[in-house]
Image (cartoon, rainbow, N blue to C red):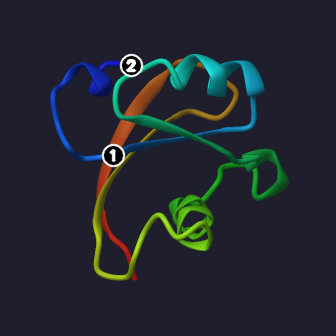
Amino acid sequence: LWMSRQISSIPIYALTRHERTRRRMALCRGVYPVGYDASMTEPIPEPRQAIACLQNRGLLNTGDRIILTHGEAGEPGGTNAMKVLLVT
């Protein structure tokens, strides 16, 4: 929500398994909700799994730089980490 308040042409892909959350995020400017069930992966999902999800949908390309934000597993709404990554 905070990132969508900034005026930018950079898309925000929001990955979640919750349909209600996807519907709410679709109302935010520049946010594109993507269905992603991290519980089907490791206990703490690896960033590369989220990146692979977006690559498989044709939303990311090799060489893209992304900012990945996430929170602790099991604590909804608690985004507390940010990483700048290069898509390989």
Q: Circle 2: is it few (<14), some (14-19), or many (20+) Cα within 10 Å?
A: few
Q: Which residue is mark 1?
A: 11
Asked if the residue at tag 2 contacts the one at tag 1, i.e. Cβ–Cβ closer than 8 Å, the answer is no
Residue 47 at what x, y percent from top left?
A: 52, 60
* Residue in the image at 30% along x and 19% along y: 2
Where 28 falls versus 68 (above or below)?
above
Farthest-out residue, right: 40
* Residue in the image at 24% along x and 19% along y: 5
Type of the residue with mark 1:
Pro
Q: Circle 1: is it few (<14), some (14-19), or many (20+) Cα within 10 Å?
A: few
Residue 27 at what x, y percent from top left?
A: 49, 18
Numbered tag placed on residue 36 in the rendering = none
Where 57 falls versus 42 (above or below)?
below
Type of the residue with mark 2:
Leu
Q: Which quarter of the image is occupied by the C terminus?
A: bottom left
Of tags 1 and 2, the one toward the viewer is 1
Farthest-out residue, left: 7
Which residue is more in the foreground, 67 or 5?
Answer: 5
Q: Earlier in the sequence, mark 1 or mark 2?
A: 2
Residue 64 at what x, y percent from top left?
A: 29, 72
Q: Which residue is mark 2?
A: 1
Identify the element where label 1 is drawn: loop
Q: Is residue 50 left or right of residue 29?
A: right
How many callouts does the rendering have?
2
Where 83 falls versus 54 (above or below)?
above
Q: Quadrant of residue 18?
A: top right
* Residue in the image at 28% along x and 27% along y: 3
Identify the element where label 2 is drawn: loop
Which residue is more in the foreground, 70 or 24?
Answer: 24
* Residue in the image at 58% along x and 60% along y: 46
Which residue is more in the foreground, 38 or 35?
Answer: 35
Residue 35 at what x, y percent from top left?
A: 70, 44
